[in-house]
Image: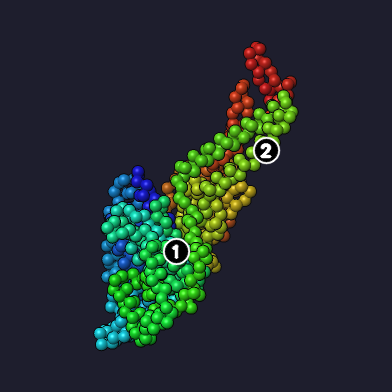
Amino acid sequence: MDNPALEEFVEEVEEIIEDLEEGVLLLEEQPKKRSLIDRIFRDMHTIKGGAGMVMETELAEYAHHFENLLDKARNGEIVCTPEMASLLLRSIDGFRSFLDKIREGGDVDQQLINETLEQLREFEKNAGKTATKPAAKKSVEKTKGTDVSQNESTPDEKIKPEQSSAPEEKKIESDKSEEQEEVQWDDEDEGEETAYLLHLKFDSEMLRKGSDPILLIKDLTELGDLAMIPHLGRLPDLKNLDPEEIHLWWSAKLVTTHPAEEIENILIFFQDDKNEVNFEAAESPPGDPGLASFGIYGDQESEEQSKEQEQSKVDESEVETKSEPEPEAEAAATDDQEAKVGEDSKNEITQEPDSPEEQQKTVSAPEIQKTSPPKADAKKDTGIKTTQSIRVTIDKLDNLQNLVGETVINQARLHRLSDKIMEIDVNLGEMLSQFVEDNEKSVQELQDQILQVRMIPVGSILNNMKRTVRDYATRSKKKIRLEIEGGDTELDKTVTEQLQGPLVHLVRNSMDHGIEDSETREKQGKDPTGTISLKASQQEGYVIVEIEDDGKGIDSKVIFDSAVRKGFINDTDELTEDDIYKLLYMPGFTTTTEVTDVSGRGVGMDTVKRDIEALLGTIEISSELSKGTSTKLKLPLTLAIIEGMMIDVGHQVFTIPLLSVNESLRPVPKQIKKIKNKGELVEI
């Protein structure tokens, strides 16, 4: 894949898919939580928008189908059910297939895509028969973003009843609400409004590259109330105006109950070295979505605006008599303006007057003085924060790590050199020794920092197990609960990625061999729902990952007898319980007589052990019959640094990994033996 834009898109979508999958699993547990539906909708919409930007039209169309499904769920037209959750999880498999196609250049799994879309059509057909409508009170609440439907009344319709169809619509809505159950969201009143200031300055060539800032603005309006002000500093004369270039840039204020992460998800596809797109939390009260509290009018330094300001300096009495309209006319003018905005833009963006004269019609002079600080203060209050993170490929980190490793080796050589110079010249040796000591601190800090950069939370793979457990429980009809602790424990990215396979197998073992069915558990006095716990913690330079279950445990006698039958051991061998558990790592060993789609072929635990040892880790099993089993993985924080021993061979210096050193010694002269005066051996 030679296209940098595609590479970045794939990386972004991979992260979004993880969040999407987690959101769907949570929605299955809390189907009436509106914020979860909004979160999943946002992820789907982001994938669709990003796919369109990189010209992956099939992927964009695929995402669009499920975006429509979620939009209906948001509006109460479709009820969230376990079947819908299964469908959304199936759609995620389709997204992964598209990403595989982009990465590897092959074909998408068309059978999977077609089956998923067919399931979607069938679900919508059946769900439409039992659809519900959202609460009717929404029709009289303040609308946000593009949530306003095409047939809702506009402000001018409110002051002209004879031209409005609102009464009829209200009657129809009331009739429907009598027949259909009203959707009550559990988190309808959750969350406080927060105001954010946005800085939207795009590359002038953006339109020619296939992107459109209107798409971003539409996405932002779906999050809440968006007020914008254009900056005209880049606007050329009419004769030099190019309709295919972007000459404006915008400052905006967004008032929303959505978290900042959702805003970041929208902006992230427009953040590069050509676009200045970022945001920060505003200090002004969130209840005032207007631009008067921006304090950014002072940033408009265009000549046209300066002239308008000079022309506005007229006699005070003249302003009072000519610019103050009657209250009724003022209200009508305001409503007319809002209606015009609604007609011109479906984004429902609140627009402020372009000139100071028009501004005086809607905002009183004292209010302007109160909310609009001087230019210097405005810049201070609305300072835009730059993006605090960048995306770097692992190859670049590996190269940087190699250079740091060379620096560490050179530092060790300097130590040796300073010792030798000390024998020749004490003063020079002390100076060099002091330099080496000071430099060592910097080298150590550099090494620590590059290791920290490679660390990611292990929760990224622990959370992936939720889908594995959910799918297995659905197929097997077992009731299984997954608990995760220590997801913020950090581990080297390389180690984390290679841990995925062993972790999946161990969790499947717990589900298939450990957790009993509900009926059996009830007979034993256990909770009908089995529990699998994933715990991560850091101990003395290692990360410990434990997989525990409260299932039936491991019967060591069954393992011993099975090993004897298969010829792994003799029935006369005396083994401790730990030795018996180690038999589970033998290739081809299994105690299961029935082969399933999860286990039974004896090709699992030996692979797990081999993979963990490849990560320089260890695996340990403990179990108690009828109580459960625990598997503990001990892994190094990173593979980027391996301790070594430096040795002199002739005039050369070599470093041997300590893992390869079983024993080291300093021989005394009497231990050194000569062989025919040609060589020396050490007698041990």
Does the CB distance between marks 2 and 1 fall below 8 Å? no
Residue nearer the viewer, 126 or 586? 126
On the image, the x and y values in percent for residue 70 come to 35, 68
Looking at this rendering, what residue extends furthest in the left direction?
163
Dot 1 crowding, Cα within 10 Å, few <14, some 14–19, many 20+: some
Residue nearer the viewer, 669 or 628? 669
| Residue visible at 47% across and 68% down in the picture | 295
Up the image or down, 585 lies above or below 278; here it is above
| Residue visible at 66% across and 39% down in the picture | 438
Label drawn at residue 437: 2
Q: What secondary structure is found at the residue carrying circle 2?
A: helix
Residue nearer the viewer, 400 or 304? 304
Residue ID for mark 1: 299
On the image, the x and y values in percent for residue 360 come to 41, 77
Which amino acid type corresponds to the residue marked 2 in the rendered image? Glu
Which amino acid type corresponds to the residue marked 1 in the rendered image? Asp
Label drawn at residue 637: none
Q: Along the polypeptide, which appears first: circle 2 or circle 1?
A: 1
